[in-house]
Image (tube, rainbow, N blue to C red):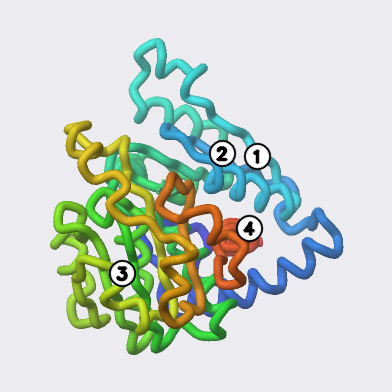
């Protein structure tokens, strides 16, 4: 029996090393089965609710695809046309959704720790699809799955995480999940105002090596993976601060060509302008494949959480 059966997934720390390798192998198996048969029957009769209180493209749609490909059903809660607009609290909404007896609920919210705050009033397992600036655990899962597929390992990698590390939730989750691997080095690359939060560093202290740097050029030759993130415009309190910082780092093809080739370039997407589109056709640009990997690894996760 899998150790994730019936469990909530609220943090990247919820996966241990053994879970990760098991999910990678399962995702590979499901990839093959899905490409052969399209729809499987593991999750027949099971229902997943996607409750996204904040915009999403990849996370929601890839979870929905994953559940559909497993043979399960999907019910989508859409905040804009819900009773939230009549003043219902989000906690009540979650209780109502749970009262219909779904088998799993995937939740995204702009408030950090929202999924944690409702987990005790919800019977179904909750998977976080991102909570404000806090975490995005299943993004981290697909990130390390992509690295494992591309490099054949995650142990021993040197990774540069570039961009808005202060407001982004993917850098914290990716950092946490990397603590499950051995001998990892992280370079946090950002302007001072956007550097990684201390609270994140405290949680990884002693478990990975890390360095804070101001420009990608300083470390580019050392990297196995460059992980680029966008500036999180919607999370800035002062729009002038955003205006000052936007465009402060941009990866272009001509810039990359000046250095030793970085083996893997990733981005959780959406991209704004931090990776020029002329990088997309380089063989090491893996961000679209990374997004596609999300379906298979999320299918693996759902299969385990559902216990099917
Ligand atoms: N899609 C990712 C997230 O939801 C990254 C981003 O929005 O920049 O956090």
Earlier along the polypeptide chain: callout 1 or callout 4? 1
Disc 1, disc 4: CB below 8 Å? no
Question: Which residue is the extreme one toward the top?
Answer: 86
Q: Position of residue 197 (x, y in %)?
A: 17, 58
Disc 2, disc 1: CB below 8 Å? yes
Tell me the CA gap for discs 2 and 1: 6 Å
- The quarter of the image holding the N terminus is bottom right
Disc 2, disc 3: CB below 8 Å? no
The residue under label 1 is: 74
Decide: is 75 above or below 174: above
Decide: is 85 above or below 52: above
Earlier along the polypeptide chain: callout 4 or callout 2? 2
Q: How many marks?
A: 4
Q: Is residue 185 left or right of residue 127?
A: left
Earlier along the polypeptide chain: callout 1 or callout 3? 1
Q: Position of residue 83 (x, y in %)?
A: 45, 16
Tell me the CA gap for discs 1 and 3: 42 Å
Question: What element does badge 2 sit on?
Answer: strand
Decide: is 188 above or below 128: below
Could you say which quadrant of the image residue 213 lies in? bottom left
Q: Position of residue 5 (x, y in %)?
A: 53, 63
Mark 1 vs ligand 1: CB under 8 Å?
no
Earlier along the polypeptide chain: callout 2 or callout 1? 2
Earlier along the polypeptide chain: callout 4 or callout 3? 3
Q: Is residue 153 left or right of residue 240?
A: right
The residue under label 2 is: 49
Question: What element does badge 4 sit on?
Answer: helix
Question: What element does badge 3 sit on?
Answer: helix
């Amino acid at each position: 029996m899998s150790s994730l059966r019936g469990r909530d997934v609220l943090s990247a720390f919820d996966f241990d090393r053994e879970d990760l390798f098991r999910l990678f192998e399962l995702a590979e198996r499901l990839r093959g089965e899905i490409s052969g048969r399209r729809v499987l029957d593991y999750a027949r009769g099971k229902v997943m609710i996607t409750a996204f209180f904040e915009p999403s493209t990849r996370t929601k749609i890839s979870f929905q695809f994953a559940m559909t490909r497993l043979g399960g059903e999907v019910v989508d809660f859409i905040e804009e046309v819900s009773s939230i607009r009549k003043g219902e609290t989000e906690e009540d909404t979650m209780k109502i959704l749970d009262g219909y007896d779904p088998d799993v609920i995937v939740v995204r919210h702009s408030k950090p720790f929202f999924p944690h705050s409702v987990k005790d009033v919800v019977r179904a397992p909750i998977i976080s699809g991102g909570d404000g600036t806090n975490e995005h655990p299943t993004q981290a899962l697909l990130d390390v799955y992509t690295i494992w597929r591309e490099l054949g390992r995650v142990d021993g990698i040197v990774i540069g995480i570039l961009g808005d590390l202060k407001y982004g939730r993917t850098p914290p989750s990716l950092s946490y999940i990397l603590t499950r691997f051995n001998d990892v080095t992280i370079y946090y690359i950002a302007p001072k105002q956007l550097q990684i939060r201390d609270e994140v560093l405290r949680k990884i202290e002693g478990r990975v090596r890390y360095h804070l740097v101001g420009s990608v050029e300083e470390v580019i030759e050392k990297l196995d993976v460059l992980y680029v993130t966008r500036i999180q415009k919607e999370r800035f309190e002062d729009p002038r601060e955003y205006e000052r910082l936007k465009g402060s780092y941009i990866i272009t093809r001509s810039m990359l060509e000046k250095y030793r080739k970085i083996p893997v370039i990733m981005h959780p997407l959406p991209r704004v302008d931090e990776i020029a589109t002329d990088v997309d056709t380089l063989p090491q640009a893996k961000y679209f494949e990374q997004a596609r990997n999300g379906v298979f690894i999320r299918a693996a996760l759902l299969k385990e959480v559902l216990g099917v």
